[in-house]
Image: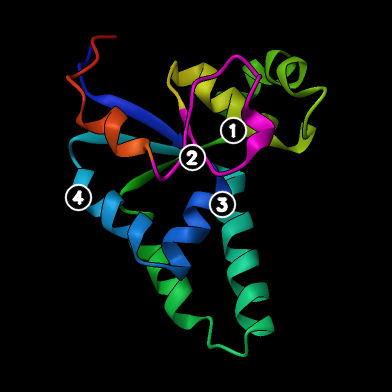
Amino acid sequence: MTNQKRLVLDANILLRAALGIRVLNILETYDGLVSFHTPDICFRDARKYVGVISAKQNLDATAGFLVLDRIALIVQTVDQGLYEEHEAAAKARMRHRDLEDWPIVATSLLLKCPIWTEDQDFFGSGIATWTTNTVELYMQDSPLII
């Protein structure tokens, strides 16, 4: 198999990359060392909210959209046709949380890897989660053999 670590990114991480500096720097630093993935819906959500947040703050959303295009080269989009086989299991894990997050959990189950998120709805789902404050500990640790 592979010894490269993998992470599934929630839409809020993509959004932080588009509108900030820290997450983008982490993604670029570990590109090629860690395999980053996100379900297709997360890029759509991030694009939507870059526009919404930019409009609320009276900012031009163009820079955020350009960063999303840039990180789309780093973060692999996982098509629903691949993760939907885990939909029932993912929804069962999220039934007392936010059911709309099932694609992220399903992608995590598909790839057998943790989730990078700031959303506490994943906590208690039985899936390992990492926040931006701690995710580098996971990435810097010795390679995982899967």
Task: State how far apart marks 1 and 4 are (Cα).
Answer: 23 Å
- The quarter of the image holding the C terminus is top left
Relative horizontal placement of residue 64, taking residue 28 as reference (left or right):
right
**Which secondary structure class fits the magenta region best?**
loop
Number of other residues with Cα within 10 Å of mark 3, as a class: few under 14, some 14 to 19, many 20 or more: some
The amino acid at mark 4 is: Thr
**Regarding mark 2 in the picture, which secondary structure is present there?**
strand
Task: State how far apart marks 2 and 3 are (Cα).
Answer: 11 Å
Q: Nearer the viewer, mark 4 or mark 2?
A: 4
The amino acid at mark 2 is: Thr
* Earlier sequence position, callout 1 versus callout 2: 2
Task: Identify the residue position indicated by label 2 in the image.
Answer: 38
x and y, in percent, of residue 21 in the image:
35, 66
The amino acid at mark 1 is: Ile
Residue ID at (49%, 50%): 13
Q: Nearer the viewer, mark 3 or mark 1?
A: 3
Taking depth in this image into account, of 14 and 133 the one nearest to the observer is 133
**Regarding mark 1 in the picture, which secondary structure is present there?**
helix
Number of other residues with Cα within 10 Å of mark 1, as a class: few under 14, some 14 to 19, many 20 or more: many
Number of other residues with Cα within 10 Å of mark 2, as a class: few under 14, some 14 to 19, many 20 or more: many
Label 4–label 3 contact, CB within 8 A: no
The amino acid at mark 3 is: Asn
Label 3–label 1 contact, CB within 8 A: no
Q: Nearer the viewer, mark 1 or mark 4?
A: 4
Residue ID at (40%, 44%): 133
